[in-house]
Image (spheres, helix red, strand yellow):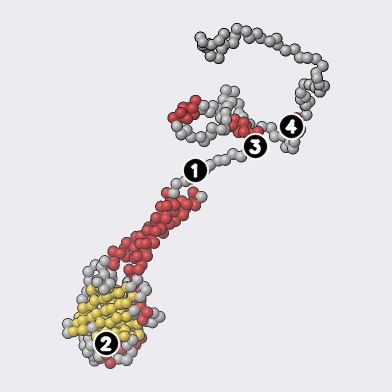
Amino acid sequence: MRIVRVFGGVLLLTIGIPALLAGAVLGMLTRHADSAGAFSARFETVHTPGHAVVVRDLDGLLRAEAPFTRAGQSRLRLEARTADGPAFVGLAPADEVRRWLDPVPHAEVHRVALARGPLPVRLGPAAPSAGIAPAVAPITQPFWVREGIGALEWSPEDLADRRLSLVVMRPDGRADLTLELRAELRAGWTAPATAALLAGGVLTVALAVLLLLRPVRPREVVFVVEPDQVPVLAGRLGVTSLSGLGAQPTRDSDRSRTVGRQLASVGAGNGGSLPAIGPVPARRPETLADLAGDGPAFRPPGVSLSLAWPPVTTAETAPPVPTEGRLRPAAPESPDAPR
């Protein structure tokens, strides 16, 4: 049973300590949220001589760079501004965006790294086809799934099982684009997850400590023997009697008597080993007559009885003892008493 408690305590510790650490990390992260519970971050200034900045596979980029944004009921918001005012932000199928922007110079986002301060954005230019393509206003295109001027908000459910591209450009579609970007994440699962991890970790560690530090109860050994085997058991234990075992003195006089009757070992002088039990009889006696054994039975001496009355002979008795001169009056005689 002790091994089972140790194994269970170690297993609970391996579960509870990581849960406490994860809850502590989430608790530190929630301190960076604003009053509304949102996490925000700015991006480095993005500049391209083309007409647009495109993320070909938005869900793939989030899965690779920020997978926590796709958990639970999270919502993402992207704000974009140009030097002239709010920029156009839209979500559309990747194939439609490729066909529309192939003849137009634009830049593609390859990576967004998580770092302290403004987040760095790695861009890669996409070469346009031969010729100069005229500027096309994005708001007139019919393939947008979501679009907005200045900001766009979506949830991971909008990107599930769909390959959508994110497009940021001027509302009129002109080239020479400079963008100021800011992202915001609202994750409603952080506070409940932090509380659950901390509470579960504390309870698990407390239960593990109780299992590991629980005192072991002493085991009591009870001997059940036949009455005739009590001397044999006392000799096996090395004491003269079993009556005083376990008795605790309650007073000073009892302690002194206990010291005077200390149990002494039996058979210590001859140094021989004592058998655990005596010789076992061939069969258990059923009656007292069976205890006589095979030897001659003991008979009491004969007694002759006479039932005649009166007895034939008179038993001699001791002679009477004279009592004269040995009696004392009960009270002293009065001088006026008659003589």
Residue occupying the point 59% across, 11% down? 327
Using the image, determine if residue 300 lies above or below residue 4: above
Dot 2 amino acid type: Val
SS class, disc 1: loop
Residue at numbered disc 2: 104
- State whether residue 190 appears in this view: yes
Residue at numbered disc 3: 226
SS class, disc 3: loop
Q: Earlier in the sequence, mark 2 or mark 4?
A: 2
Q: Nearer the viewer, mark 3 or mark 1?
A: 3
Dot 4 amino acid type: Leu
Q: Which mark is residue 218?
A: 1
Dot 1 amino acid type: Pro
Alpha-carbon span between mark 2 and mark 3: 107 Å
The x, y position of residue 331, in whole percent, is: 53, 14
- State whether residue 49 appears in this view: no
Q: Nearer the viewer, mark 2 or mark 4?
A: 4
SS class, disc 4: helix
